Amino acid sequence: MVRHTYGCQDGCPVESTLQIISGKWKSVILFHLIKNGTERFGDLQRQMKDCSHRMLALQLKELENDGVLVKTIYPVMAPKTEYRLTSFGETLVPVIIAMEKWGRYYNATHREEESSQA
């Protein structure tokens, strides 16, 4: 999969942010890591039922390559793999929390609008 490059001006701060968190599942992955700390691949997959195994692996790899999270593999039988935010990744916490708050607001507003239209 080819990374999308946005057409903003050089140095556009929104473009810089989107380069890291764009992708259907990256923000959701970050949300789960923020809320739960360290997560195993299977735990993330259970929480993100609509995300395929391949897509989750791809999005995690991109976040790892961007220095947002770190993958730790424990050399035990049935290898255990865990993901956690790096200190750089932790700088995204306010962004993801703001997205969570806005999403809660939107969901509440949208439900009210649907109820009034019924």
Image (cartoon, rainbow, N blue to C red):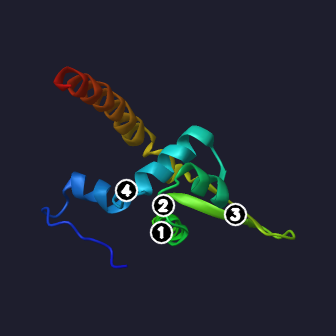
Numbered circle sitting on residue 55: 1
x, y percentage for residue 87?
A: 54, 50
Circle 1 — which element?
Answer: helix
Q: From mark 3 to mark 2, how far is it between C-alphas?
A: 21 Å
First reached walking from the N terminus: tag 1 or tag 3:
1
- 40 relative position to 94: left or right: right
Residue with the mark numbered 3: 72
**Residue type, mark 1 in image:** Met
Q: What is the spatial separation of the Cα atoms under label 3 and label 4, in whole angstroms? A: 21 Å
What residue does disc 4 label? 21
Amino acid type at mark 3: Thr
Query: Crowding near pointer 3: few (<14 within 10 Å), some, many (20+)?
Result: few
Q: How many marks on residues?
A: 4
Real-space Cα separation, disc 4 to disc 1, in angstroms? 14 Å
Q: CB of mark 1 within 8 Å of CB of mark 2?
A: yes
Q: Nearer the viewer, residue 91 or 37?
A: 37
- Residue at left 32%, top 31%? 107
